[in-house]
Image (tube, helix red, strand yellow):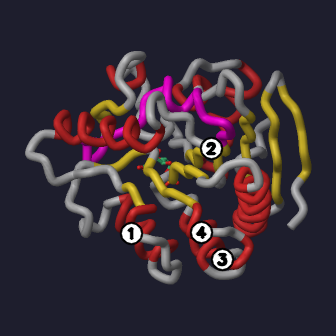
């Protein structure tokens, strides 16, 4: 699926004609990225985005592209999670279970959901932090992070003007969303910006103005603050989301 590459003020963009074509293009790029990394190391760590945008991508990864990725060597993490039970309709884990995991047989030890059973999300954040430190043997450097963006420019659960966005010590913070479910868990910017590769996936005309503000005006919204120090960042847009550029 063809995309048009464009570079605007330091942002690498890939623009597809439709959300469907975007999903195929990202699946193709992800499969290529995984095979390149697995040629150099035993495991691949992938952090998944929540929300609606990536659902089609996850379906493709579990079907047309399932054989293109050596899933037994891929470890799944979450970039953020709503602080609800794992079977709650708004759970990002549930969305991934229904789209990606339902038909992919990953070893159980490869799936690292954010815990939402502790009474307090702060305790859950600390648990996930320990899981990341144990897996990476130190500061987590994820091989690839998938992110979405809200119309307010939030990404993961780093919402504008919230403490989680300003967190620079912790690896996992408690996010505060303006809409229910308000309590979230989220990777913090230090973790996102330590990644080897970050793919931001944005589709739909409703996000075009936010995309323009970030890419054309440098608006310091949360999604604009994802800039891996030593990694690659690609903004994957459909034509609608890129329509105000
Ligand atoms: C979440 C996501 C969040 C999402 C954006 C975009 O838990 O909701 O992680 O950051 O990526 O809100 O959501 P849509 O893809 O539904 O527009």
- Give the x, y percent position of residue 231: 71, 31
Indicate yes or no whether the magenta region holds residue 192: yes
Neighbor class of circle 1 (other Cα within 10 Å; few <14, some 14-19, many 20+) is few
Q: Which residue is mark 3?
A: 66
Q: Quadrant of residue 67?
A: bottom right
Determine the CA span between mark 4 and mark 2.
14 Å
Q: Nearer the viewer, residue 159 or 167?
A: 167
Viewer-nearest of labels 3 and 4? 4
Mark before the other along the chain sequence, 1 or 4: 4
Residue 57 shows in the view: yes
Mark linked to residue 71 = 4
Looking at the image, which residue is at 13% across and 47% down?
118
Q: Do the CB atoms of the residues marked 1 and 3 lie less than 8 Å apart?
A: no
Mark before the other along the chain sequence, 3 or 2: 3
- Give the x, y percent position of residue 244: 76, 39
Q: Which residue is mark 1?
A: 108
Q: Quadrant of the N terminus?
A: bottom right
Mark before the other along the chain sequence, 1 or 3: 3
Residue 177 shows in the view: no
Looking at the image, which residue is at 48% across and 72% down?
106
Looking at the image, which residue is at 69% across and 19% down?
218
Asked whether, in this view, residue 176 is left or right of residue 204, the answer is: left
Q: Which residue is mark 2?
A: 143
Q: Nearer the viewer, residue 213 or 166?
A: 166
Q: Do the CB atoms of the residues marked 4 and 2 lie less than 8 Å apart?
A: no
Determine the CA span between mark 3 and mark 2.
19 Å
Mark before the other along the chain sequence, 1 or 2: 1
Q: Do the CB atoms of the residues marked 1 and 4 lie less than 8 Å apart?
A: no
Looking at the image, which residue is at 40% across and 45% down?
80
- Give the x, y percent position of residue 64: 71, 80
Indicate yes or no whether the magenta region holds residue 3: no
């Amino acid at each position: 699926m063809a995309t048009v590459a464009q570079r605007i003020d330091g942002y690498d963009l890939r623009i597809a004609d439709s959300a469907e074509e975007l999903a195929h293009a990202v699946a193709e790029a992800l499969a290529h990225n995984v095979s390149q990394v697995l040629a150099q190391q035993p495991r691949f760590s992938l952090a998944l985005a929540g929300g609606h945008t990536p659902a089609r991508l996850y379906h493709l990864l579990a079907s047309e592209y399932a054989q293109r990725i050596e899933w037994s060597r891929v470890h799944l993490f979450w970039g953020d999670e709503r602080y609800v039970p794992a079977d709650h309709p708004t759970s990002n884990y549930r969305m991934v279970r229904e789209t990606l995991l339902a038909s992919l047989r990953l070893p159980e030890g490869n799936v690292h959901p954010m815990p939402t059973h502790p009474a307090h999300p702060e305790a859950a954040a600390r648990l996930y932090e320990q899981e990341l430190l144990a897996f990476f043997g130190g500061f987590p450097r994820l091989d690839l992070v998938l992110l979405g963006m809200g119309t307010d420019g939030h990404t993961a659960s780093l919402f504008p003007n919230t403490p989680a966005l300003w967190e620079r010590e912790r690896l996992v913070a408690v996010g505060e969303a303006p809409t229910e479910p308000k309590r979230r868990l989220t990777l913090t910017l230090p973790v996102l910006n330590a990644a080897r590769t970050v793919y931001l996936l944005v589709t739909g005309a409703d996000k075009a103005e936010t995309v323009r503000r970030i890419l054309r005006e440098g608006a310091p919204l949360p999604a604009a603050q994802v800039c891996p120090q030593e990694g690659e960042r690609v903004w994957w847009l459909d034509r609608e989301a890129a329509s105000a550029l």
